[in-house]
Image (cartoon, rainbow, N blue to C red):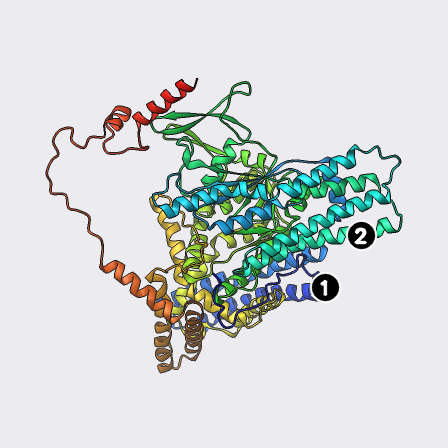
Amino acid sequence: MAVKRQFNTEKDVTPLPMQHEKASTFKITMNRIFIIMTVLFWLLYVASTIFDQWTRGNGSFQQVVEAALYIVIMTLLCFSAFVYLVSRNGALIRFKEHKRVPRELLEEHFAEEKSAITVLVPSYDEEVGVIRKTMLSAMLQEYPQITVQLLLDDKPNPTTPEAAAKLAATQALPRELMALLEEPRARFTAAQAAFLAKENKGTTVSSADLRLLTQEYRYGRDWLLQLADDEPQEDHVDAFFADQVLRELAKELGLQAQALKQAAAAGSGLPIKKVSAMYARLVWLFTAKADYFQRKEYVSLSHEANKAMNLNSYIDLMGGRYRIEHTAVGKVLVAVAADQPADLEIPDSEFLLTLDADSVLLREYCLRLVYLLQQPGNEQVAVTQTPYSSFRGCPSRIERIAGATTDIQHILHQGTTYYGATFWVGANAVIRKRALADIAETESVNGFEIRRFIQDRTVIEDTESSVDLEKHSWQLVNYPERLSYSATPPDFGSLVIQRRRWANGGLLILPKLFATMKERRRQGEPLKLMEIFLRMNYMTSIAWASFGLIFLLAYPFDDRLLSVYIVCAALPYFTAMASDLRYCRYKRKDIFRIYGFNLLLLAVNTAGVIKSLQQYLTGEKIPFARTPKVNDRTACQSLYLWAPLVIIGFSLFTIWRSLSVNNWQNAAFAAFNAITCAWALLAFVGVKDLLVDLVHNFYTWLFVEVSPKDNGAQESEGEGLDWQTVLYYGDTQGEVPLKVSLSAALDTETEEQGQR
């Protein structure tokens, strides 16, 4: 069902160019001037404020504390602005220096080097259509050996018919996609075998052979165009998939066919090696394997509800052969030797590609990133990726502005690589598997050995794993092109879940960064100062920006503390961001929308930071909240709806209070906050959805389903006793780690003996 387009959204679904525009010398120079201006005006601000307090202040304790607090807040905000400009500087330099590897070199490299890659797609209750696009974009990668593994995290035994039907459709998806590609796979495999079977004399191929190859490329083009025409066209993501994945690939094959036709007409025989590579290219496109794996079918694997453990469970099994044993607590995977029969075999691969179930890859993603990993000098690169970009043509205003922040972050992530401060962004990444073995940790859960390659201590597992890898002297690199795209939450409720998760965990990981700094110094490879700055800002800026802004909004600071110098220090940051928005095909004035957007999310970010502190104090993990990827709107908690209303109301009160004491600077700041926050609330949430969610939340709070009361009567001895649990565990004191079914295990064992 198509979503109704809101006013002031974009209709153009054309994505940003794959290759970044090369930055001019003028642009790089201006950015460096911006950096100098930020530092200079910050120094002038601090010096002038201290001097003003020294000469004009009354020396009261309150005044000194206020001035010190204000300086600290402004210093931290200026530091984040400084880091933005520094990251931008690195990105501009990388864009200017980047040279795309020619296709010929890629084909020559992979003609000899055919390292396998396994694409891991963790999924929990995702829409089948969303998963299908993700898997198909991975299966159509131009790569020699690729396996796409769907890692289902849904319950193996759904309790409702709807859930059972959805799970069955999801489980059938890999087989359906394999069947979809079977016809071109069989044709191109046969054509390649026929060409290789010929006794080609000399070093070139005849015009007749070139015409045969031309027909194969035309067939591939026509097949992909037909597939694109048959694809559903319900939203902008469907349009992107059909146009950028299928039709662009068809266009590329058509272009190759045209070139081959002209070469044949000119009688210019191509080298046998080149023609062989072109046949291999067609085979690569359609020979990907696909399957699914459901870890919760086996009690010997972790059942923790997070993406990290879903990935860890499968990675730990890779390269092994297993027998399935039916026990009283469920299915158990037992490793068996190579000469013993096995029920399950998990293939191994040198590289992994972790891919969110709502992400889409362009066709050369694996080819170019694995090529990068295999270049001399990159042996210690553990993770490489192209930080995802947003789908364009969003029908909702909030999805559009959230997409703008995503595209800005793409630029900044490219800049962090310039300073060696890359963070793994979990939507997609190519990983060297042996690097994960270096950071693996083992523990026992319910009597089974569980290995953690990717940490699940926080809900931002990619960030923590980045620090773990660097501690072991591994490197992370962002590839300076746009080759991956991911969905942005389409409404405020789902955006709250995502951004609260992003804000939770950075403070918990900070001690690991300090430990990494210490370890790298011990190894004689200390981290550079700029890398430390960028990493600290990445992990903690949400915390100090959120609490700092709350202080600025709520506390009536002396108007003399707001100096023209601090305004001048912030101006380069906003100017650069406005320029970056324009570069990403948004509007410069969207910077005001982003400011209001951040005010709207102030309570969300603060809640995420508080959750980090809660986990630090209690030692209990914060549950992983998945971002909904469904067409229906996600309801939002009342706290995050009341928060912007409070900001607006308090800002109006601050205006009145400031004007009454002639504090014009605070009044202007409060007025700006009230206007931008009110506009954001109306544009991104809407009055109707705001009222509906508030009423719904109040109703569910007011009317709570009451459980039957315990009348205190003691059951007779043995009545209601779970005899299977008692016989298996003994006296559990009410704690049962895994459900026991001795009778089911006995039935299975009897059945297996009968078969033998």
| Residue 25 numbered mark, or none | 1
Nearest to the observer: residue 416 or residue 153: 153
State the count of labels: 2
Q: Position of residue 184 (x, y in %)?
A: 66, 43
Label 2, residues with CA under 10 Å away: few <14, some 14-19, many ≥20: few
Residue under the image location 74 percent in, 41 percent down: 279
Mark 1–mark 2 Cα distance, whole angstroms, equals 37 Å
Mark 1 vs mark 2: in front: 2
- Circle 2: residue type: Ala
Residue 652 appears in the rendering: yes
Asked if residue 76 lies left or right of residue 418, the reply is left
User: Eyeballing the image, is 354 above or below 682?
Assistant: above
Q: Earlier in the sequence, mark 1 or mark 2?
A: 1
| Residue 259 numbered mark, or none | 2
Asked if residue 251 lies left or right of residue 671, the reply is right
Q: Position of residue 138 (x, y in %)?
A: 59, 46
Nearest to the observer: residue 718 or residue 537: 718
Q: Position of residue 570 (x, y in %)?
A: 54, 68
Residue under the image location 52 percent in, 19 percent down: 340
Corner quadrant of residue 270: top right
Local SS, label 1: helix
Nearest to the observer: residue 674 or residue 359: 359
Residue 378 appears in the rendering: no
Tag 1 and tag 2, C-beta contact below 8 Å: no
| Residue 484 numbered mark, or none | none
Q: Position of residue 107 (x, y in %)?
A: 74, 42
- Circle 1: residue type: Thr
Local SS, label 2: helix
User: Eyeballing the image, is 539 above or below 292?
Assistant: below
Label 1, residues with CA under 10 Å away: few <14, some 14-19, many ≥20: few
Residue under the image location 79 percent in, 42 percent down: 275
